Image (tube, rainbow, N blue to C red):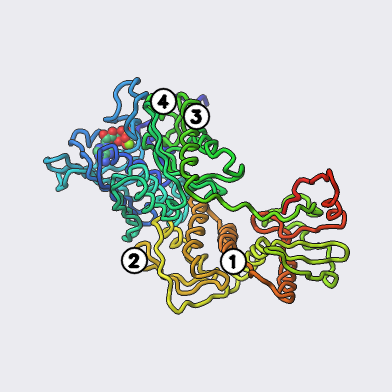
Amino acid sequence: MQPTIHLLSDETINQIAAGEVIESPASVVKELVENALDAGAQKITVEITGGGLKLIRIIDDGCGMHRTDLRLSVVRHATSKITQPQDLFHIETKGFRGEALASIASISKMVVMTAQEGAHGDLIEVEKGSIVKERACARNKGTTIEIRSLFYNVPARRKFQKTAAAISAEIFRTVTVMGLSHPNVQFELISNGRKAIKTVSKDGIESRAKELLGEEFVSGSFPLEFESGEFRFSGLIGAPTNNRNNKLGQFLFLNQRAVACDEVSEAVREGYATRLDEKRHPIFLLHLQLPGDLIDVNVHPQKLQVRLRNPELVCQKVSRAVGEALAKSIKKVELPKVEFTAFEPVAVDYSAPLLKENIVEEEQELRFDQDLVEVMGQVGRFLLLQEGKEMILVDLHAANFRIIFEDLIEKSESKAEKQGLLIPLEIELSSIESAMVLTHLDAIEALGFTILSRAKGHFSVEAIPPFVSESEVKQMLCDMAHHLQEFIGKQDYEKERQRALARSAARFSKPKNQYSKEEAKRFFDRLRACASPLHCPKGNKTMVHVTDDTIENLFRTNQKTTEGASL
Ligand code: ADP
Ligand code: MG
């Protein structure tokens, strides 16, 4: 039969739009907080229960709505923010599409209470996109929006939602990002009745960053202030040594809008020039104020991406600003010490490609014969061993990292060693760090910790793994919290998480300064017993074989150095 064409009902249209705009409870929070910001709110409270699937309530003290506007607000393509096409090129508000409320209302049970300055309040209840109840209510200036039973009529969407803990973490990141985008607005996030975030800072981005991202983020960064014509940039950029292997420590705001913009991120990198390894990413928190007509925000349904109208100009200025800020600050701080480079033997690279910790391959087949290996001594951070005519150099740091890492992986399945502390360590973490530690507490404790959560952000550490020193516990937890953010929004991550935590923890264990011959032998035997003894979990070599030829080469003139030979 020939299908006939018909127009879709409003309800269907709204649900289709919701499919694009509202992926998860975190997208609801984002849209509603943006509306509150557009309404000029100074204080925004976000309350969630059950990861937001049961309830999301956003309370703001913004301008509120008149009764007629309230009715219109839940209608699709109804907005107070733009009127004509050319307005799209000068958008100064977060919203402009007029579809968030209509979309959310079509897939939830929504109540909106609102009042303008000096006026009485109004309330509407919306179901499947239609107003089902309307009455007066008591309300100070501002708006409260309650969303219950999100996705109740779209079972497919509901089924694909992650666990409540995973969604809460996502909402956590959303509110953190919003809090960084507007450092002068106060934010509060209450999850299942518990305060998860509460900002108090009012004096700018640095104190806001301290509150939301932690002391370490700020102390490991340099300030950036830059002005050129209509361009104003400000924020913090990480010290080159304070880099990461992912982009989670990057917070970029274009005209106070949190966006991903690869061009700009790359321009920041370029500003670091050779100060940064190619595979590493800087951390930064940057607010770029650009002429409005240079940004096209009408390119992504969730407004998470933007298009720049003159990317070269913007990027060139960003790189310059970063370069200048670094040059100014680096003069003031001590440059990182150059790595130890004794002599340069040519490694006999029998393991050819760089092995990552998770590729076990045939590392078991070590070539040396246990009895022929003799410990010769220790030079600084290297152990010297002899095997027949060959010499083996072991990097104690890399080797120790490998040994502890595998120990942790193995033990967390049984029971990790714990060392009780006589006086518990009191530790304060930033909001995002605390949320990560709380969400993944079991997995962290499996490494040998006992941690009690006290007041908001305060923890009492009662036992620690034996290989970590008390003075480094806080740094270690922060590092873990940072890596745990990678799992926000992911599912089935248990194994991956265990490795990430073990890697993060093992990095903090240090080899001894001086080994006796016996200890050195035992250390080497432990290394040899590892599943992947040749590389540390980051992929650096734990040992190199130095042959006669290698040594001879060192004495010849015009010697060639082989790539990958450095220790
Ligand atoms: P958009 O933000 O794109 O305009 P929305 O569907 O998010 O579309 O909101 C529709 C309209 O409802 C807004 O244009 C605004 O006028 C009004 N509105 C929504 N939330 C609030 C709020 N918290 N305070 C005041 N007005 C609001
Ligand atoms: Mg909006």
Mark earlier in primary sequence (2, 3): 3
Q: Which of the labelled discs sits on residue 455, or is there none?
A: 2
At numbered mark 3, what does the secondary structure look like: helix, strand or loop?
A: helix
Q: CB of residue at label 1: within 8 Å of ligand 2? A: no
Nearer-the-camera pick, 6 or 274:
274
Residue behind mark 4 = 294
Res. 12 in view: yes
- Kindly report which numbered mark, 2 or 3, lies closer to the viewer in this rendering: 3
Residue at x 49% of width, y 55% of height = 482
Q: Residue at x 79, y 46 (%)?
A: 562
Q: Can residue 16 be seen by looking at this rendering? A: no
* Type of amino acid at the residue the image marks with label 2: Ala
Tag 1–tag 3 contact (CB < 8 Å):
no
In this view, the mark in front (4 or 1):
1
Mark 2 or mark 4: name the one nearer the start of the chain: 4
**Sequence-wise first label, 3 or 4:** 4
Q: Label 2, label 4: how many angstroms apart (C-alpha)? A: 45 Å
Q: Is residue 39 left or right of residue 171?
A: left
Q: Tell me the amino acid under the disc marked 3.
A: Gln
Residue located at (40% from left, 43% from top):
27
Residue on which the image places disc 3: 316
Q: Where, by quadrant of the figure, is residue 117 drawn?
A: top left
Kind of residue indicated by mark 4: Leu
Q: Which residue is mark 1?
A: 509
